[in-house]
Amino acid sequence: MNVVPDTSAVVDGRVSERVEDGTYAAATVLVPEAVVGELESQANDGLESGWDGLSELKRLADYADEGTIELEYVGERADGDARSHAHEGDVDALIRDIAADRDATLLSSDIVQAEVARAKGIDVEYVEPVARGVVDKLPIQQFFTDETMSVHLKTGTKPKAKRGALGEMRYEVIDDEESSEEQMDEWATAIVDLARQSNEGFIELSDDGMDIVQFRNYRIAVARPPFADGIEITAVRPIAKTTLDDYEFADELRERFKERKRGVLISGSPGAGKSTFAQAVAEFLNDSDYAVKTMEKPRDLQVGPEITQYGALGGEMENTADSLLLVRPDYTIYDEVRKTNDFEVFSDMRMAGVGMVGVVHASRAIDALQRLVGRVELGMIPQIVDTVVYIEAGEVHTVYDVTTEVKVPAGLTAEDLARPVIQVSNFETGRPEYEIYTFNRQVVTVPLNEDGGEAESETGVGRIAKQEIEREIKSVAHGHVDVELKGNDQAVVYVSEGDIGTVIGKGGGRISDIENRLGIEIDVRTHDEKPGGRGGGSGDDRSANGQGDGRGGQVGEERGTVVTPEITSRHVVIDVDAGVGETVEVRADGEYLFTATVGRGGEVQVSRGSAIAEELEDAIDRKRTVTVVPAR
């Protein structure tokens, strides 16, 4: 008899099984080249099914050498496009065609393949698929105790775990014996197989070198080479299930959620208990007769069966959001709002009228709100997020109320500087703690003191005002410029005596224009009038302090030595190879930029974002010649 096995039968070892029991004694086994190609592709992808199938082909070759069967490879290998569409039936079609052409029996463990072949008049022998690697419990279950939140395993290392109460987790060794590669491979394979075969598990993501598995309430990441430098298994589970009554401000938060559909960010550091609180909120909303859904990747929130948990449809949360808008939930819990795309999806759904509760990583409550800055229009933030809940050590630490008001920001005095200001108020005390607004084309977040004023004179608006004053003055001054803030609404500018008239402008016009725009009174003086003399200054004023390792050119005479500044992620670095503590002037095409003190090793560093750094970067972009000369 002639037998054509498909990929499923070869992987399950069904051909050699029938040779051994005599069913296929003296049979001619026709193995399609398309099957060989598919097995090779799976093995190259690190899939156990590919290696199992190749082992079966080796057993068939041994039987052929013994004369038990005849073995022949037939047909053509499927091209890459056909293999990539194997799940759509392209390879199966090639196998059926060979069985039909050779008048052979098709052996298959694939019920769809078998039924299609029968419909086409092909003789079929269907066998039940083998449940490979089935286990009835999680293979690494023994490492979990009642207080274990996560288990961390890796080849060649001792097993570790995070154990303890929320906020008091200890990362500790839980077994003195290092995990061997063989043991790790066995665990990793068993975990993935369990997720595939169990009704209580599924594979959230499967890619080259990484599988994300959800089994019951365990989320397990299985990493393999070449993605990781060794086999690694990280299993996480929640160790507490709470209700909203377990948290501070429970009554107030309940009323807040019921009052109207809200936009809420639940923030905190990793392991603080954000997801546990989000689950409590979801259960409360569901019990309060709201239609509640979740958006998760991976799906690991522990919520009741009435709350449907959605993943990323087609790998994109935008698609999930589109589907949810058709489902029309009252509230959606969005777990892990992290990337710009996540914030955009969150914002779109909120503006569509859906109540949104997002889980965000942040080290401070205000940081969660600032992550929206630059991602959505500033004026829309209070409409998108009106409540921020900060979780620390499993407890509600801070709740912020987010509103908007047209007012003069704290730190400014002129009435004509009124603008839309986002006020972030402490929910418990009602006192504003932060203001967020646009000042001179920049968004600033200003911490407020107990009196509602700006907490520090050179943070927020003060810092930007100082930069703007510097920028305006240095555009016309030829010499060195220093700016000192005197409170929230006064500043003193020190310039060379010859620059006084130019800086003030005809009839005081230039200074008046800056004063009116910034709402800051500016006093222009010479360097000789500055306490302590001319001085150098640092940071955002017209001088810079250098630190470095001493690379670059020599400081020359008056015309200077040409240098090539290096722009890093945080600094603009100039190597001048001068003595530590020496003062130099930096110029662009001979035009004075700033004065700097040389740091260790002969290097000058200027913090990016400062006024002088921006002008230096502009000179570099314009390909102006940057030179360094000794200051006189």
Image (cartoon, grey):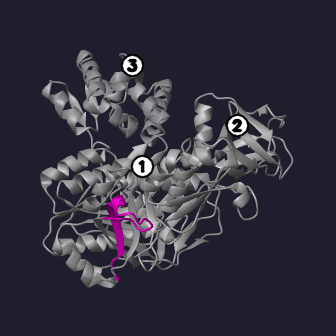
- In the picture of the structure, the residue carrying the numbered disc 1 is 441
- Which image quadrant: the N terminus? top left
Is label 3 in a helix, a strand or a loop? Answer: loop
Which residue lies most toward the front here? 507
Q: x, y (%) of residue 74?
A: 37, 17
- Residue that label 3 marks: 77
- 267 on left or right of 573: left
Question: Which mark is in front, 2 or 3?
Answer: 2
CA separation, marks 2 and 1? Answer: 27 Å
Mark 2 or mark 3: whose residue is earlier in sequence = 3
Residue 598 visible in the current orientation: yes
Picture coordinates of residue 229 (x, y %)?
Answer: 60, 47
Is 421 in the magenta? yes
Q: Amino acid at mark 1?
A: Arg
Question: What is the three-letter code of the residue carrying label 3?
Answer: Arg
Sequence-wise first label, 1 or 3: 3
Residue that label 2 marks: 587
Q: Residue at x 60, y 38 (%)?
A: 617
Q: Nearer the viewer, residue 180 or 314?
A: 314
Relative vertical location of residue 311 with respect to residue 556 in this rendering, above or below: below
Give the Cα distance between marks 2 and 3.
Answer: 68 Å
- Amino acid bearing label 2: Arg
Q: What distance separates the C-alpha of mark 1 from that of mark 3?
A: 62 Å
Q: In the shown orientation, is residue 44 left or right of residue 10? A: right
Of the image marks 2 and 1, the number of the one nearer the N terminus: 1
Identify which residue is drawn at 36% across, 69% down: 424
Q: Count residues near mark 1 (Cα–Cα under 10 Å), then give few for <14, some for 14-19, many for 20+.
A: few
Q: Measuring from the top left, give residue 231's x and y in whole percent.
A: 56, 51
